[in-house]
Image (cartoon, helix red, strand yellow):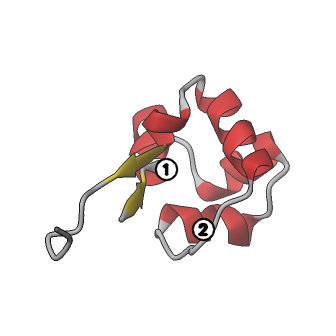
Amino acid sequence: MLKIKLSDLMGKHKLTIAKVSELTSLSRPTISALYHEKVSRIDFETIAKLCKLFNCTVGDLIEYVPDSTED
């Protein structure tokens, strides 16, 4: 299972969904869906824009969390 850590990054930098949208040119619904982890896929360009904004790596934005039902 993948965890999107956008809400953590936004909290750390004290940014709103509207401000992230403005700074990255990504749509507010896209940012909102990522913030609430309601996505099933994410575009490479979206990842790149968010990593650039937060000056972070992909691993800072997306984390793999093993599912407890997996072997």
Q: Residues under labels 2 and 1: Cα distance? A: 10 Å
Name the residue nearer the viewer: 63 or 67: 67
Q: Amino acid at mark 1?
A: Leu
Counting from the top left corner in percent of width and height, residue 71 is at 16, 68
> Residue at image x 72%, y 38%?
48
Label 2 belongs to which residue? Answer: 32
Image quarter hosting the N terminus:
bottom left
20 vs 30: above or below: above
Quarter of the view holding residue 24: top right
Q: Amino acid at mark 2?
A: Ser
Name the residue nearer the viewer: 41 or 52: 41
Label 1 belongs to which residue? Answer: 6
Q: As drawn, is 35 to the left or to the right of 65?
A: right
Residue at the extreme top: 55
Quarter of the view holding residue 42: bottom right
> Residue at image x 60%, y 68%?
32
